[in-house]
Amino acid sequence: MEAISDDELWQRFAGEPISHDSAAHYRARLERRLVINRCNACGTWRHPPKPCCPVCWSTDIVPTDVSGNGTIHLVVFLHQGPPADGVDFTTPHPVVTVELDDQPGVRFTSTVVGTTNDEITIGRRVTLDWIERASVPLPVFRLADGIER
Ligand code: ZN
């Protein structure tokens, strides 16, 4: 896919906090790739994105694909919130923070699809999946049964 302009990116992801440091992450989402910034000097992953490495202070930051595999670190169930495309607060809506296998402490927050809320618990293994929300791809997680750490 040809890279779109910054203006188009802002229009596609209206309301998202797109900055110089996160633009590559959102561009990759359009290709259904989960990209997180990584230090090119020491290899440290960093999310949310910042302009320099928290370990070696290098500004040589390279947006890099992650595996999308991880473990549920935190779960909340939202009973209310601002209206959002595809979000049903009556179930309630699950939100998880997943610690990615790529590096301890690197976590990505989204939702879990394809299961019931009873199954969404801390410590469960998940894999990356994609849905469409507000006409753009959204990275989500799906339980990865049978894969134990
Ligand atoms: Zn570094």
Image: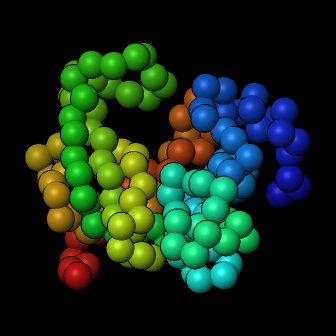
Establish if 82 lies above or below 70. Answer: above
In-image side of 35 versus 78 (left or right): right
Residue located at (66% from left, 56% from top): 51
Q: Position of residue 83 (x, y in %)?
A: 42, 16
Residue located at (33% from left, 19% from top): 81
**Colouring rule applied to residues:** rainbow
Residue 122 location, quadrant: bottom left
Residue located at (58% from left, 54% from top): 49
Establish if 135 lies above or below 38. Answer: above
Question: Does residue 142 appear in the picture of this structure?
Answer: no
Quarter of the figure that contains the N terminus: bottom right
Quarter of the figure that contains the C terminus: bottom left
Question: Does residue 17 appear in the picture of this structure?
Answer: yes
In-image side of 12 versus 53 (left or right): right
* Front-most of residues 148 and 103: 103
Establish if 80 lies above or below 9. Answer: above
Q: Residue furthest front?
A: 57
Residue located at (74% from left, 32% from top): 10
In-image side of 18 versus 43 (left or right): right
Q: Position of residue 46 (x, y in %)?
A: 52, 63
* Front-most of residues 110 and 89: 110
Q: Residue furthest left?
A: 118
In-image side of 80 versus 17 (left or right): left
* Front-most of residues 29 and 113: 29
Q: Position of residue 31 (x, y in %)?
A: 69, 56
Establish if 143 lies above or below 84. Answer: below
Residue 18 location, quadrant: top right
Q: Position of residue 69 (x, y in %)?
A: 40, 71
Residue 71 location, quadrant: bottom left
- Numbered disc total: 0
